[in-house]
Image: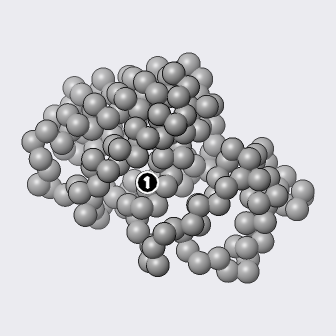
Amino acid sequence: ITNHLADLIPGATEIDASLVVAPLSHGAGIHQINVVARGAPTILMPTERFDIVEAWRLIEVESARLAALRRQDHHVAALFDAIEREKALRERDSKFTQHVHFHLLVSQATNNGLLTLMAQPTYKVLQNRFLRDDLAVDFWSVVDQDHELIAKCIEEGDAEGAALAMSDHLANIRSSYE
Protein backbone atom coordinates (compact mmCIF):
# COMPACT_ATOMS: atom_id res chain seq x y z
CA ILE A 1 0.00 0.00 0.00
CA THR A 2 2.79 2.43 0.85
CA ASN A 3 4.40 2.10 -2.59
CA HIS A 4 1.05 2.45 -4.29
CA LEU A 5 0.32 5.61 -2.27
CA ALA A 6 3.69 7.09 -3.09
CA ASP A 7 3.17 6.44 -6.81
CA LEU A 8 -0.48 7.41 -7.28
CA ILE A 9 -1.50 9.84 -4.55
CA PRO A 10 1.53 11.13 -2.70
CA GLY A 11 0.70 13.57 0.04
CA ALA A 12 -2.79 12.16 0.59
CA THR A 13 -3.99 12.67 4.16
CA GLU A 14 -7.12 12.26 6.24
CA ILE A 15 -8.41 15.67 5.07
CA ASP A 16 -8.50 14.57 1.43
CA ALA A 17 -11.51 12.74 -0.02
CA SER A 18 -12.38 10.26 -2.74
CA LEU A 19 -15.48 10.61 -4.92
CA VAL A 20 -16.81 7.34 -6.32
CA VAL A 21 -19.00 8.06 -9.36
CA ALA A 22 -19.43 4.50 -10.63
CA PRO A 23 -19.66 1.04 -9.05
CA LEU A 24 -16.29 -0.08 -7.74
CA SER A 25 -14.66 -2.83 -9.78
CA HIS A 26 -11.93 -5.00 -8.30
CA GLY A 27 -9.28 -2.71 -9.79
CA ALA A 28 -10.93 0.44 -8.50
CA GLY A 29 -11.25 -1.23 -5.11
CA ILE A 30 -7.46 -1.64 -4.99
CA HIS A 31 -7.06 2.10 -5.53
CA GLN A 32 -9.71 2.76 -2.90
CA ILE A 33 -7.66 0.86 -0.30
CA ASN A 34 -5.08 3.66 -0.52
CA VAL A 35 -7.64 6.30 0.39
CA VAL A 36 -8.84 4.20 3.32
CA ALA A 37 -5.22 3.66 4.46
CA ARG A 38 -4.85 7.43 4.83
CA GLY A 39 -8.11 7.76 6.75
CA ALA A 40 -9.68 9.95 4.06
CA PRO A 41 -13.45 9.85 3.57
CA THR A 42 -15.00 8.15 0.57
CA ILE A 43 -18.01 9.86 -0.96
CA LEU A 44 -20.44 7.55 -2.76
CA MET A 45 -22.95 8.87 -5.26
CA PRO A 46 -26.45 8.67 -3.71
CA THR A 47 -28.07 7.81 -7.04
CA GLU A 48 -28.09 4.63 -9.08
CA ARG A 49 -27.04 6.41 -12.26
CA PHE A 50 -24.42 9.05 -12.88
CA ASP A 51 -25.85 12.47 -12.02
CA ILE A 52 -23.44 15.19 -13.21
CA VAL A 53 -25.03 17.91 -11.09
CA GLU A 54 -24.82 15.75 -7.96
CA ALA A 55 -21.20 14.87 -8.71
CA TRP A 56 -20.49 18.58 -9.15
CA ARG A 57 -22.08 19.32 -5.77
CA LEU A 58 -19.99 16.67 -4.04
CA ILE A 59 -16.77 18.00 -5.56
CA GLU A 60 -17.55 21.68 -5.00
CA VAL A 61 -18.70 21.51 -1.38
CA GLU A 62 -15.62 19.55 -0.34
CA SER A 63 -13.42 21.90 -2.39
CA ALA A 64 -14.83 24.94 -0.57
CA ARG A 65 -14.25 23.28 2.80
CA LEU A 66 -10.64 22.36 1.98
CA ALA A 67 -9.96 25.74 0.36
CA ALA A 68 -10.86 27.49 3.62
CA LEU A 69 -8.39 25.27 5.48
CA ARG A 70 -5.52 25.32 2.98
CA ARG A 71 -5.76 28.57 1.04
CA GLN A 72 -2.95 31.06 0.76
CA ASP A 73 -3.25 34.83 0.36
CA HIS A 74 -2.75 34.68 -3.42
CA HIS A 75 -5.71 32.29 -3.71
CA VAL A 76 -7.98 34.72 -1.88
CA ALA A 77 -6.84 37.64 -4.06
CA ALA A 78 -7.50 35.59 -7.20
CA LEU A 79 -11.01 34.69 -6.01
CA PHE A 80 -11.97 38.32 -5.39
CA ASP A 81 -10.42 39.37 -8.72
CA ALA A 82 -12.47 36.71 -10.51
CA ILE A 83 -15.65 37.97 -8.85
CA GLU A 84 -14.97 41.53 -10.01
CA ARG A 85 -14.30 40.36 -13.57
CA GLU A 86 -17.48 38.28 -13.53
CA LYS A 87 -19.56 41.27 -12.36
CA ALA A 88 -18.22 43.39 -15.22
CA LEU A 89 -19.29 40.91 -17.92
CA ARG A 90 -22.69 40.93 -19.59
CA GLU A 91 -22.66 38.21 -22.26
CA ARG A 92 -23.87 34.73 -21.17
CA ASP A 93 -20.93 32.64 -22.41
CA SER A 94 -18.38 35.06 -20.98
CA LYS A 95 -20.18 35.08 -17.63
CA PHE A 96 -20.24 31.29 -17.58
CA THR A 97 -16.53 31.11 -18.42
CA GLN A 98 -15.72 33.46 -15.54
CA HIS A 99 -18.11 31.52 -13.28
CA VAL A 100 -16.17 28.34 -14.05
CA HIS A 101 -12.90 30.19 -13.46
CA PHE A 102 -14.07 31.13 -9.94
CA HIS A 103 -14.87 27.49 -9.17
CA LEU A 104 -11.52 26.33 -10.55
CA LEU A 105 -9.80 28.87 -8.31
CA VAL A 106 -11.65 27.41 -5.32
CA SER A 107 -10.42 23.94 -6.25
CA GLN A 108 -6.86 25.26 -6.73
CA ALA A 109 -6.99 26.81 -3.26
CA THR A 110 -7.40 23.29 -1.83
CA ASN A 111 -3.86 22.50 -2.98
CA ASN A 112 -5.33 19.14 -4.04
CA GLY A 113 -4.58 18.56 -7.71
CA LEU A 114 -7.04 15.69 -7.88
CA LEU A 115 -9.99 17.93 -7.00
CA THR A 116 -8.93 20.43 -9.65
CA LEU A 117 -8.51 17.65 -12.18
CA MET A 118 -11.93 16.19 -11.35
CA ALA A 119 -13.65 19.56 -11.61
CA GLN A 120 -12.52 20.52 -15.11
CA PRO A 121 -14.40 17.89 -17.14
CA THR A 122 -17.46 18.40 -14.95
CA TYR A 123 -17.67 22.06 -15.98
CA LYS A 124 -17.29 21.15 -19.64
CA VAL A 125 -20.22 18.73 -19.47
CA LEU A 126 -22.35 21.22 -17.55
CA GLN A 127 -21.68 23.99 -20.07
CA ASN A 128 -22.23 21.87 -23.16
CA ARG A 129 -25.25 19.88 -22.07
CA PHE A 130 -27.09 21.47 -19.23
CA LEU A 131 -26.81 25.27 -18.90
CA ARG A 132 -30.20 26.59 -19.95
CA ASP A 133 -30.68 29.60 -22.22
CA ASP A 134 -33.77 30.90 -20.39
CA LEU A 135 -32.11 32.01 -17.16
CA ALA A 136 -33.92 34.39 -14.81
CA VAL A 137 -33.00 38.05 -15.13
CA ASP A 138 -31.33 38.15 -11.70
CA PHE A 139 -29.55 34.78 -12.10
CA TRP A 140 -26.04 36.19 -12.48
CA SER A 141 -26.57 38.71 -9.64
CA VAL A 142 -27.39 35.81 -7.32
CA VAL A 143 -24.29 33.96 -8.57
CA ASP A 144 -22.12 37.01 -7.84
CA GLN A 145 -23.53 37.34 -4.30
CA ASP A 146 -23.02 33.64 -3.66
CA HIS A 147 -19.43 33.81 -4.92
CA GLU A 148 -18.71 36.77 -2.63
CA LEU A 149 -19.94 34.84 0.41
CA ILE A 150 -17.95 31.73 -0.55
CA ALA A 151 -14.79 33.80 -1.05
CA LYS A 152 -15.30 35.61 2.27
CA CYS A 153 -15.65 32.31 4.15
CA ILE A 154 -12.53 30.96 2.44
CA GLU A 155 -10.65 34.15 3.27
CA GLU A 156 -11.66 33.86 6.94
CA GLY A 157 -10.68 30.17 7.09
CA ASP A 158 -14.29 29.23 7.89
CA ALA A 159 -14.40 25.69 6.46
CA GLU A 160 -17.97 24.88 7.48
CA GLY A 161 -19.21 28.31 6.37
CA ALA A 162 -17.50 27.89 2.99
CA ALA A 163 -19.01 24.42 2.55
CA LEU A 164 -22.48 25.66 3.49
CA ALA A 165 -22.18 28.73 1.24
CA MET A 166 -21.12 26.51 -1.66
CA SER A 167 -23.94 24.06 -0.99
CA ASP A 168 -26.46 26.92 -0.92
CA HIS A 169 -24.95 28.39 -4.10
CA LEU A 170 -25.31 25.11 -5.96
CA ALA A 171 -28.90 24.75 -4.71
CA ASN A 172 -29.60 28.28 -6.00
CA ILE A 173 -28.34 27.50 -9.49
CA ARG A 174 -29.32 23.82 -9.81
CA SER A 175 -32.48 24.60 -11.81
CA SER A 176 -30.35 26.27 -14.50
CA TYR A 177 -28.72 22.89 -15.18
CA GLU A 178 -31.84 20.71 -15.33
Q: Quadrant of the N terminus?
A: bottom right
Note whether 18 is above or below 50 in the view shown. Answer: above
Q: Residue at x 39, y 23 (%)?
A: 80
Asked whether, in this view, residue 73 is left or right of residue 12, the answer is left
Q: Residue at x 84, y 52 (%)?
A: 6
Asked whether, in this view, residue 138 is left or right of residue 161, the answer is left
Tally of marks: 1
Q: Residues within 10 Å of mark 1 (few under 14, many from 20)?
A: some
Q: Residue at x 52, y 37 (%)?
A: 160
Note whether 23 is above or below 66 in the view shown. Answer: below
Q: Which residue is drawn at 59% across and 38% down?
A: 66
Asked whether, in this view, residue 142 is left or right of residue 106, the answer is left
Place of residue 100 in the rendered image (x, y in percent of width and height, measured from the top left): 37, 43
Secondary element type, mark 1: helix
Q: In which quarter of the image is the C terminus?
A: bottom left
Place of residue 65 in the rendered image (x, y in percent of width and height, measured from the top left): 54, 39
Nearest the viewer among 115 and 98 is 115
Disc 1 marks which residue?
Answer: 57
Note whether 79 is above or below 123 in the view shown. Answer: above
